[in-house]
Image (tube, grey):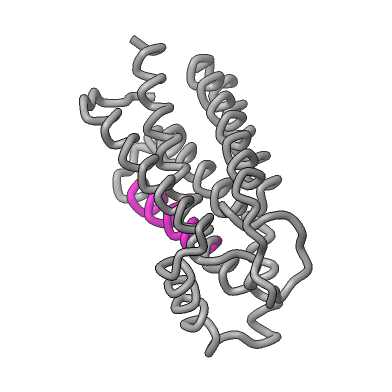
Amino acid sequence: MFVPQNKYRPFIASIYLALFLILLILVKTNSTIVTSFDKFVQNLLLPITNPTNTRIVEKITYLGGPRIAAILSIIVSLYMFIRHNFKAGIWSASTLVIGNLINVLAKNLIQRPRPSDKLVAIGGYSFPSGHTFGTALFIFFVVFLIVPQIKDVTLRRILTFLGFLWILIIALTRVYLHVHYPTDTIASVLLVLFLWESSLIIWRRISD
């Protein structure tokens, strides 16, 4: 995996972490900024909320579950090993494990209850969204490890676009089902971006 030198990467990673921590504090203190934003986005989805759409969304959101995302990410790591890119395999596997540990730690630290009007039965805490986190991390693996091996430039761009669109879709399914607040999904993306930039810094050091 080729990662161009970027002296601003530590700064970029710090920005993502700072934004995540600010959002974390706002959620923990039950800030009106957070509650108003969450309510606003939830209300936007109310007009399309009906039993038929809910059944469809349930099936879609299942595909973005943490277990499925983890399995797919592991497959990407194994693929790198098979291609004899052992450093990339170890790096991606380590990033996956550390990332999920951070996500679980954040959930248990904040302990934000899920919305009370959930459309499906689910336990656990709300912040950050495990579905969004797992899906985003998997897509980053694909975009940076698999897609660059495709020779067709147009196909690479299409796959990259579809990948990031999939992250948005999974995030919206969690909000639609009222199992997460919108800020839960935003926090997940910020956490993944911080983790990814930090991981790229490590990659540069082990690959030099």
Q: To which quarter of the image does residue 104 belong?
A: top right
* Residue 24 coordinates in the image, percent (x, y): 48, 51
Instruction: Assess whether residue 102 is covered by the magenta stretch.
Output: no
Q: 65 or 18, which is in the foreground?
A: 18
Instruction: Assess whether residue 159 is covered by the magenta stretch.
Output: yes
* Residue 16 coordinates in the image, percent (x, y): 36, 42
Residue drawn at x 30%, y 28% is 10
Tell me: residue 187, above or below residue 10: below
The majority secondary structure of the magenta stretch comes to helix
Q: Residue furthest front?
A: 29
Q: Which range of residues does the magenta coloring cover?
A: 156-170
Residue drawn at x 50%, y 66% is 182
Q: Residue furthest left?
A: 7
* Residue 94 coordinates in the image, percent (x, y): 57, 24
Tell me: residue 123, above or below residue 116: above
* Residue 89 coordinates in the image, percent (x, y): 54, 22
Horizontal side, residue 49 vs residue 55: left or right: left
